[in-house]
Image (cartoon, grey):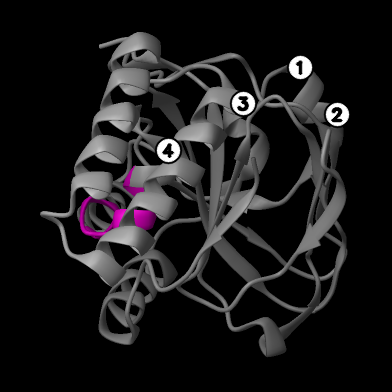
């Protein structure tokens, strides 16, 4: 499943996050790379232990907790604290796959990476190139969203960031360990949740069919969830 989640950050929150990260001490992005990524990555990154990344990351985590579509789609169990990168002219990230387990180096926090997320922090008209290209069972899709919007996709996907040719692409990226490990099962649950909400909007939450479908949703979640 690949899904765009609009308006994770409203304009005020986006401005706040940008003010924090723009004032941070950017470093070579390969400080946090594994062997494969180091061969593919050319960008800059905020040190994950730095004050700027931590403060901006807390704002993003708070915004995610208030975003129903993210919660319904990801069914998050644990979220790796958001990281931040920037691409200028000539910088890119060639095709790679994310590590199955992500470990935060300074305190040993770790998760299984079921889902990857990119939260765009730059206006798409402010830079050329810099598309996130994701390859998976659903085909190949290039993504370049408005600032404040996010894309969620399987961490098992091959993906890359195309070279930036003008301006600067700033984004936050992170990983989610879902309560439901299987991507197909998460997709079924999201489809069912969406259908239940549509029927409830038409008939009201006390409708017998809505109650029955809600029960089916929770029984499937009970069968598949790991908590």
Q: In this picture, is 76 found above or below 99?
A: below
Q: In this picture, is 29 found above or below 154?
A: below
Magenta stretch in the rendered image: 63-71
Which residue is labeled 1 in the image?
A: 35
Q: Residues within 10 Å of mark 4 (few under 14, many from 20)?
A: many
Residue projecting furthest to the front: 208
User: Residues under labels 2 and 1: Cα distance?
Assistant: 7 Å
**Position of residue 174 in the picture relative to residue 183 (left or right):** left
| Callout 1 secondary element | helix
User: Residues under labels 1 and 4: Cα distance?
Assistant: 28 Å
- Tell me, yes or no, whether the two marked residues, 2 and 1, touch with CB atoms within 8 Å: yes
Residue 39 badge: 2
- Tell me, yes or no, whether the two marked residues, 1 and 3, touch with CB atoms within 8 Å: no
Comes first in the chain, label 4 or label 2: 2
Residue 184 badge: 3
Q: Closer to the camera: disc 1 or disc 3?
A: 3
**Position of residue 6 in the picture relative to residue 14 (left or right):** right
- Tell me, yes or no, whether the two marked residues, 1 and 4, touch with CB atoms within 8 Å: no
Which residue is labeled 4 in the image?
A: 74
- Tell me, yes or no, whether the two marked residues, 2 and 3, touch with CB atoms within 8 Å: no
Indicate the quadrant where residue 98 lies. top right
Indicate the quadrant where residue 167 lies. bottom right
Q: Residues within 10 Å of mark 2 (few under 14, many from 20)?
A: few
- Residue at (59, 53) in percent of width and height: 3
Residue 55 badge: none
**Which x, y percent locates residue 114?**
53, 24
């Amino acid at each position: 499943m690949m899904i765009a989640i609009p308006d994770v950050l409203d304009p005020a929150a986006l401005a706040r996050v940008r003010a924090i990260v723009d004032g941070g001490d950017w470093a070579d992005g390969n400080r946090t790379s594994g062997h494969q990524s180091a061969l593919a990555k050319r960008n800059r990154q905020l040190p994950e232990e730095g004050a700027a990344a931590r403060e901006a990351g807390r704002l993003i985590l708070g915004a995610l907790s208030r975003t129903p579509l993210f919660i319904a789609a990801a069914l998050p169990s644990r979220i790796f604290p958001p990281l931040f990168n920037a691409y200028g002219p000539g910088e890119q990230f060639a095709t790679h796959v994310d590590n199955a387990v992500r470990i935060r180096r300074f305190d040993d926090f770790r998760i299984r990476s079921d889902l990857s997320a990119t939260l765009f922090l730059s206006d798409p008209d402010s830079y050329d190139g810099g598309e996130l290209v994701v390859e998976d069972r659903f085909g190949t899709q290039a993504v370049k969203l408005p600032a404040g919007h996010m894309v969620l996709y399987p961490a098992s996907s091959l993906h890359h960031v195309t070279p930036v040719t003008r301006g600067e692409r700033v984004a936050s990226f992170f990983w989610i360990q879902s309560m439901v490990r299987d991507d197909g099962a998460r997709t079924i649950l999201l489809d069912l949740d969406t259908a239940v909400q549509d029927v409830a909007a038409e008939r009201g939450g006390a409708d017998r069919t809505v109650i029955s479908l809600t029960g089916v949703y929770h029984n499937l979640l009970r069968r598949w969830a790991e908590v």
